[in-house]
Image (cartoon, coloured by chain):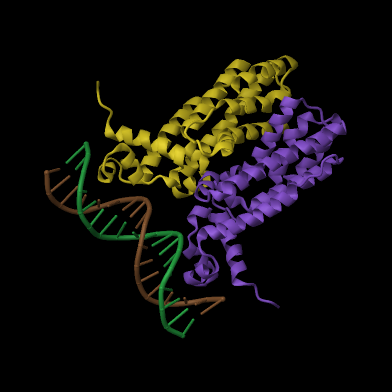
Chain colours: A yellow, B purple, C green, D brown
Amino acid sequence: MKKVKTRDRILDTSLQLFNSLGEPNVTTLLISDELEISPGNLYYHFKSKGDIVEELFDGFEAEMLDLLAVPEDVEISLDQFGFFLHMLFEAVARYRFMYQDLVNVLSRYSQLQVRFRRILKKKTTAFRTLCESFRGQQTMAIEEAELESLCEQLTLTVCYWSSFDTLSHLDNRESVDPGKGVYQMLHLILPYMAAEEQEQIRLTSHTYL
Amino acid sequence: MKKVKTRDRILDTSLQLFNSLGEPNVTTLLISDELEISPGNLYYHFKSKGDIVEELFDGFEAEMLDLLAVPEDVEISLDQFGFFLHMLFEAVARYRFMYQDLVNVLSRYSQLQVRFRRILKKKTTAFRTLCESFRGQQTMAIEEAELESLCEQLTLTVCYWSSFDTLSHLDNRESVDPGKGVYQMLHLILPYMAAEEQEQIRLTSHTYL
DNA sequence: GTCTATAATCGGATAGAC
DNA sequence: GTCTATCCGATTATAGAC
């Protein structure tokens, strides 16, 4: 029966508002209004709006780094890969405010640039590790140049799919369905997979839609 | 020896500034400063900042619709496709301020939403037409479901590649090289092309890098 | 910890002289 | 067409009472 600390409520509400309205469109006044606390109170807990953004980013970074710590030399199944993608898209969706106005946000909170780029890099590396696992298991056949290109493509898609998808229905920005993104990702690797795995992707990827 | 109209200079300079700093970070004062005219003068030519954005968007829309008017039932060569991609990426790069903070910009200038979505739709359709031309020439083999996914992927990539790419060097945002994007696009269709065309892509796509 | 009141700043936009 | 001066509104942030 412990009551939630105001500080945490501020973080929660800010995240929701950032995601649905876009960070630049959310004022500190709107946040405090939504929480039914005074603006002064908000500034008692955080010395600036940027501080809120940074603390949210901390959470995002931690989640991502945890998720992207893919062990090398492990045999991974297609199912596991699908699950990994699902987790990834959910994490991105939870912090989609970062991606929706990436350039703008990163330019205003420039300390985040390096950290964001590091995460990006980790994503690409994770995909490479996973693809190489497939390659080791003979379930994927791909040349080096194409692998490079594919991993970048996968990274791009993780970042932007949800923004791209919500463009079709900008009105309702509350929720995002990660399914379509996973489907798209699986179709990116599909052509390079062995016949059996291709079949599996064709059969199972529908369930994501 | 005719001197360029102030009105046009405002549009030019705004576009440059929007692209390099991001539209939300460019104030009307900055624009007039850069042009060494007074803010009042700027407002003589445009009744609001939104008006400048809209007029730039008009140009963007016209260019895109012109480019995307792909005739059906025409046999298109891989070279022509590459050229088309190049033009497309250049057009997007010229108006990249739209894409860099898409959600934010479209939410503040909501009249542009429908028009932007229409362009998006046209892109996907154009890619479908082109792929079907390849298919008709037996140079591409792809199932319906994969084609759908591929065309969406191509559209996503056209939109976001340059933003994604410049994330690696956020410092220098003046110029964008469309080459890498074209390379990436060609690699998306590569697995579905006939052996000969695959070879051609592998050989020529390097020149884009 | 929370409030009210208010300062400080900034950006968009207008009025009116030249 | 262009300028200077200025207003207005919004937003971030602070001071000080409770």
At which x and y percent is residue A142? 73, 26
Q: Nearer the viewer, residue B108 or B135?
A: B108
- Which quarter of the rendered picture does the C terminus of chain B lie within? top right
Q: Is residue A64 left or right of residue A180?
A: left
Residue for point 64% across, 28% down: A184
At which x and y percent is residue B55? 60, 59
From the viewer's perspective, is residue A51 above or below residue B55?
A: above
| Count of numbered circles in the view | 0
From the viewer's perspective, is residue B44 above or below residue A88?
A: below
**Residue B127 visible within the image:** yes
At which x and y percent is residue B63? 70, 53
Q: Nearer the viewer, residue D12 or B177?
A: D12
- Which quarter of the rendered picture does the N terminus of chain B lie within? bottom right
**Residue A76 visible within the image:** no
Residue for point 70% across, 23% down: A190
Residue for point 56% across, 31% down: A123
Q: Nearer the viewer, residue D8 or B189?
A: D8
Q: Nearer the viewer, residue B161 or C11?
A: C11
Q: Is residue A36 left or right of residue B86?
A: left
Q: Quadrant of residue A178?
A: top right
At which x and y percent is residue A160? 57, 37
Residue for point 59% across, 30% down: A125
Q: Is residue B208 left or right of residue D18?
A: right
